[in-house]
Image: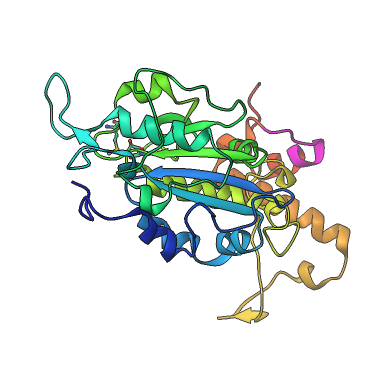
Amino acid sequence: MNDFGAETPFNEASEALGFATGQPVGDIFALNALHVDIFTLFPLMFAGPFGESIVARALANGLLSVALHNIRDYTSDRHHVCDDTPYGGGGGMVMKPQPIVRAVETVLTRKAGWALPAADVYTNLPAWDAEQPVALPAGVPVILLSPQGRQLTQPLVAELAAMPRLALICGRYEGVDERVRTQLITDEISIGDYVISGGELAAMVIVDAVTRQLPGALGDALGAHQDSHSPGMGGLLEGPQYTRPFTFRGEAVPDILISGHHANVERWRREQALLHTLRRRPDLLERMPLSAADKLYLAQQGWRERPR
Ligand code: SAM
């Protein structure tokens, strides 16, 4: 039984997001468009995060399209069961392989943007043979959100943003039956070394981070390029930023920022980025390219270079 009750239809979530069945938000034929298919037992969770701000704007502008697929819609048994007790005992429940594999194989063998029509949920599912593996399109990563996956980093985000289509599978309970991994999954991604209750929040993190990389998604074209961990920052953390008022509680904005001397401002920003990184994440300095000037500045701040 799902937390919303077995009868909760996928399309409530679609409608909450302004999705029409089979027609995700966003023009999926737009240049630079990325289409994301998300497989979940809790599609309603996505309404808030995808309904505001940068992701919502990317959806509206056709840079991004998302289709939410309720895994439960792909069950045909009376109680629409998606989980069962683990073989060998132990606590909790495990997600059954058939509904997940059926949902993913059905959706990914159709054009990006297809979703099961509401009228067909449970009752009129496209034909599928549980014993017959289906060839999925090459070049579409089928990603399981999992604390056991490779960790999400900015380079991995950039890798995902370059894909035309992604499939994200959200686990729940104690996780998914191992046959989902062996039969379906091409990649496994973790958002960090901790465990959350389901893959939905992790999928939202991926979609948000990836959207920031889509050309045109941010108002300021340089914004994402100059974020911490980004190529424009050479992988460093971003330095301090200030806005009005000039003085707050007696603390003034550094004079250099109002000097009007562009080259000096850029050098100061670089040094501040080096300083933030040295103080907060010195481990990052070990693996990034540093100029002689960077090394000199860091040495003056007490950094000792380790042999690479
Ligand atoms: N028993 C599983 C294990 O030890 O690997 C954890 C299950 S967790 C409670 C339920 C689901 O949340 C997972 O299947 C996965 O989809 C998601 N999840 C939990 N932690 C995650 C993380 N750090 N990154 C991505 N997904 C995560």
Start-end of magenta stretch: 288-295
Above or below, comparing residue 74 to residue 105 in the picture: below
**Does residue 240 appear in this view?**
yes
Residue 161: quarter of image: top right
- The answer to whether 64 appears left or right of 38 in the picture is right
The quadrant in which the C terminus is found is: top right
Way the structure is coloured: rainbow
Query: What residue is at 43 percent from the left and 19 percent from the top?
Result: 133
Above or below, comparing residue 145 to residue 214 in the picture: above
Q: Please state the horizontal and vertical placement of residue 199, each as a whole percent of the image.
A: 37, 42
- The answer to whether 63 appears left or right of 12 in the picture is right
Query: What residue is at 40 percent from the left and 49 percent from the top?
Result: 201
Query: Magenta span has 294?
Result: yes
| Callout count | 0
Q: Please state the horizontal and vertical placement of residue 87, each as a whole percent of the image.
A: 16, 21
**Does residue 144 appear in this view?**
no
Q: In which quadrant of this rendering is ligand 1 seen?
A: top left
